[in-house]
Image: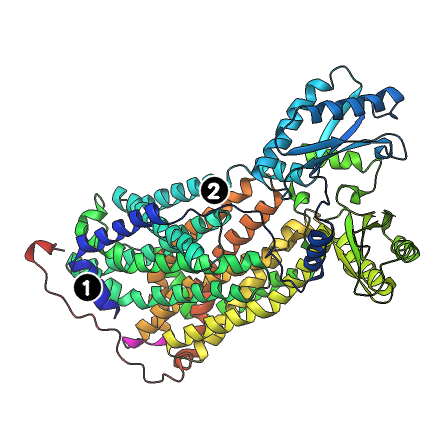
Amino acid sequence: MFGRIGRAAVLRPWLTIAAWIVAAVALAALAPQLKSTGDQADFLPSHYESVQAAEVQERAFPQHEQPAAIAVFQRSDGGRLTAADKADVAQVSSRLQALGIDHVKRVETNEQAVSPNGRIALASVVSTVEDPYDPDLMDAVEELRAEARPLLKDTELKLGVTGQAASALDSQEASGDTDAMIMSATLVLIVVLLLIIFRSPLIAVLPVLIIGLAFMVATGLIATAAELGGLKADSSITAILIVVLFGVGTDYILFLLFRHREQLRSGQAPKQAMITAVTLVGETIASAAGAVIVAFMALLLSTMGMLRTMGPSLAISVAVALLAGLTLVPAVFSLLGTKAYWPSKSWRAEPKHALADRVGSLASRRPGAVAAVTGGVLAVLSVGVLGFRAEFDMNSSLPQNLESVRAMKDMERGFSAGQADPTTVYLEKDGGPALTASELKAFGAELGKVEGVDTVSPAVPGQDGRVAQYSVVLEHNPSGQKAIELVAGPLRDTAHGASPEGSEALVGGTTAVLADIENAVSHDYKVVFPVAGAAIMLILGLVLRSVVAPLYLMVSVALGFGATLGATVWLFQNSQGKDGLLFTLPVIVYLFVVAIGTDYNILMVARLREEIEQGRSPREAAARAVARCVPTIGAASVILAGTFGVLMLAENSMLQQMGFAVAFGILLTAFVMAMLLVPALTTLLGRRAWWPGHKIGPGPETAPVRVRDDDRTPV
């Protein structure tokens, strides 16, 4: 099948290229645009308590207003606020409101907004939009900050703005243009490394153009699926699509070009060499892509809307990369022939790969020692996973000099940490008479007894008296682990147990959402990972026609996952004293290290099997396969790892964690697992690795195709 695909692309190159260009232009012109959204309604399923609480709030308290930001006032000398200072706070707040800043409904303060120690005063910034991540609201916060500075000149006050919208603004500015940074770094890495490897300007540039065309097709298909097929996707996935497409796309191009150059060196004509290359590595590329697609589609089993959205979109992008690798790449390079490698002459003769040969010799001559050492290193690194703690406070990763971070610390000098984002508790009567004043008072008193709760506001009854709302200020950071544990345990237990007969209590708000996300993530780890692992193992079994090889491959993949996450825990959590690591980090490692990194294992094992099929002994097959695959795997992994490694330049520690974990994991998968551990294990097992395929048949058919004399290049 892959021979026919390669033959069609090589013999009809202009038709193939034209089809891709037409598809890209048509999708760019006709497909809807991916839209940015901050709607988190589908972030969690409806059975979670925080979602049910939000539904009660929308139904019973549609006018409920939560400050989008908080202005924190204090004296420049840090002393107690005087009567004149308090008057200035009120005046500045009033003048800010009078400015009529778009999306700012009110800027209000009162006497109760002064801290008990008299050092801090607050003003609530109430917006006209509910989503604190709304771009227009973030612009409004930026304008409010700028307008406040001249108003403070004749006072003894200084002001900082914090809260959700302010933190979102600072986070966006601190991260910078991540999409542009990733794209620029990716392009530079691809061009520079391909130039070094092939010493050809055409090969350095063409993959970028080819993948760019594939990117247009992929984003168009995703947007069309989102519009017509009910697929939920938004523009926030663009950055990850860039990495996936350029990462796996470059992998597949390198797999093909290295094999094409190998066939040229054996004396085949350029067109025939490309057809043979597609025939030999087409199944490998398709299997690698299939494993990645299955892994991404397994995210549909997630309970979190964010991951369910990501899975199909990434699967589409990988499928497009696969199609481009099997059709567009052969078509383009068949037109160029050996001119693609100009001015290098390396395609004419096999160079001496001294390092690759030594690695292959090591893996084949001492497989037991290599397997023991590499497996031991992975196992030791995996121990770090036992200390992994999830961090849900995204603001903790921001640089400490940002205004929202400094203002939050200033506010905590006078108020509880939970003042910025109180937890809301709703008490609803199922039927019968309305809630009585005594019931409301008693319920609020019970909430106030919970250790870790600072204050509980008086009940705010709904219009029909059957629903009441309480604002609960916690002593802890609303996004911190202590607050999450408090809400998930004692506060919810007390609220449920203290609700009057015939009523139901629901705990909502940011902290409650995070508590439910923690449960959802735990569920996803138990469901998504095993299903994806089983599916990948099935694909490996089919492509290798073996039961044994997929088993030890998946064991090595699990070790690689554990080693990657464990090393990240030791570096960031233990060495740097972090409270925890990004809660989505295990999923990120799964997506980019396990799923995409499996490409290198598949390439290596497929080449091992090919060498065995040609009659070589297991040791000879290992030495030759490793020597042949080391340049390909090394180049592909360095490009992909470098793309993520650039994230370590960001000031945001969450991005640093992500960049290190994926870059380290990819390099670990390539240089330790694919080049050493897997060949060593395969050598140790010998022909038993291919059981039940004891009688390994001939390799795929590579029958020559008729080519014109001018297509032939003498060797």
What SS does tag 2 mark? helix
Q: Nearer the viewer, mark 1 or mark 2?
A: 2
Q: Nearer the viewer, residue 563 or 611?
A: 563
In the drawing, does residue 112 fall left or right of residue 235?
right
- Say if residue 76 shows up in the picture: no
Q: Which residue is at the far top? A: 154
In the drawing, does residue 328 fall left or right of residue 661?
left
Figure quadrant of residue 186: top left
| Residue 491: x %, y % from top left | 82, 58
Is 265 magenta? The answer is no
**Residue range of the region highlighted in magenta in the rendering:** 613-618
| Residue 128: x %, y % from top left | 65, 38
Residue labelled with disc 1: 7
Q: Quadrant of the C terminus?
A: bottom left
Q: Image height check: is 279 above or below 128?
A: below
Figure quadrant of residue 90: top right
Residue labelled with disc 2: 179
Three-letter code, disc 2:
Asp
Crowd rating for badge 2 (residues with CA inside 10 Å; few <14, some 14–19, many 20+) = some
Three-letter code, disc 1:
Arg
Q: What residue sits 22% from the left and 52% below the top?
A: 17
| Residue 270: x %, y % from top left | 17, 56
Distance from disc 1 to disc 2, alpha carbons, whole Å, reads: 37 Å
Name the N-terminal-most of marks 1 and 2. 1
Q: What residue sits 66% from the left and 58% below the top?
A: 517
